[in-house]
Amino acid sequence: MDLKTILEHHVVDHVWTWFKLGSLNLPFSKHALMMLIAAALLSVLFPLIIRSRSPALAPFRAMIEMIVLFLRDEVLAPNLGSKTAAYLPYFSTLFFFILAMNLLGMVPYGATATGNLAVTGGLALTTFVLINFAGMREQGLLSYLGHIVPKGVPLWLYPLLFPIELIGLLTKSFALCIRLFANMIAGHIVILSFIGLIFMFGAINPVLGLGVTAPLAVILILFVSLLELFVAFLQAYIFTFLTAIFTGASMHPH
């Protein structure tokens, strides 16, 4: 029995639950677990905090309120205008969902779901659907398709510009996918590199590895970890902010 068969039958089946869709097996990964935990936090914990009148939870309620008001006044209102209230629940959920997944990656034995390209691709897909849905809803289908190519363009340029503009719609969401993925996985790679330096120099010279490299690496790891905490909030904001810009642009082509 080869190694792949051993892992499939003696490790994977006993560690993870497999979802079966016909002949297709879909493994339940650690990143999927982190997504479920993040969704559970938003669905269960947040309503409890918001509805509770406990003084101990007051700082958390105030923090949630400040973030939501900031998203409404500084992110959505300049881009969506009068439609801000209608889209605020979605954008608030998007921000807190990404933030929760980012922060769960810093918990011991946790994993950063947004460091998985499939997860960020799924988020980018929802953004792509929202951009086109909002544009068609506000302008109408024919008007939205007519504004894909800017007005005033010569008729003979339409066959060239129309596919270019369609590709531009895709690249906006693709850029969001790659940006979030790269920024969230970069910090983990740097931390693993510092840990690897300890073992590398320790193998060459134990005194050099444990006496010099290890303390320096630990200090750098702590610094990068604090930087990752900032990046977790920053990337959730950037993804939400750019989604609001793209959505507003599709709703107001002029």
Image: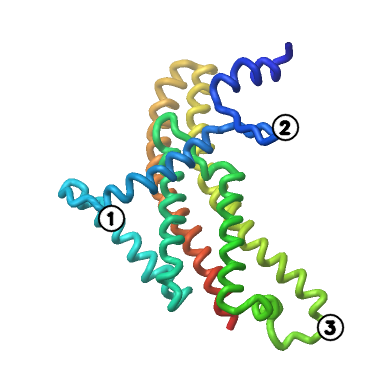
Q: CA distance from mark 1 to mark 3?
A: 54 Å
Q: Which residue is mark 1?
A: 63
From this viewpoint, is residue 123 visible? yes
Disc 1 packing (10 Å; few <14; some 14–19; many ≥20): few
Q: Secondary structure at mark 2?
A: loop
- Amino acid type at circle 1 is Met
Q: Secondary structure at mark 3?
A: helix
- Amino acid type at circle 2 is Ser
Residue found 44% across the figure and 27% down from its top: 213
Question: In the rendered structure, which disc, 1 or 3, sits on the residue that comes first in sequence?
Answer: 1
Quadrant in the picture for the C terminus: bottom right
Q: Secondary structure at mark 1?
A: helix
Question: In the rendered structure, which disc, 2 or 3, sits on the residue that comes first in sequence?
Answer: 2
Q: Name the mark on residue 156.
A: 3
Task: Give x and y (percent) for residue 217.
Answer: 43, 31
Residue found 47% across the figure and 38% down from its top: 34
Is residue 124 found left or right of 90 in the rendered image? right
Task: Give x and y (percent) for residue 111.
Answer: 48, 35
Disc 2 packing (10 Å; few <14; some 14–19; many ≥20): few
Q: CA distance from mark 2 to mark 3?
A: 49 Å
From this viewpoint, is residue 224 visible? no
Foreground mark, 2 or 3, reads 2
- Amino acid type at circle 3 is Trp
Q: Nearer the viewer, residue 117 or 21?
A: 21
Is residue 135 found left or right of 188 in the rendered image? right
Question: In the rendered structure, which disc, 2 or 1, sits on the residue that comes first in sequence?
Answer: 2
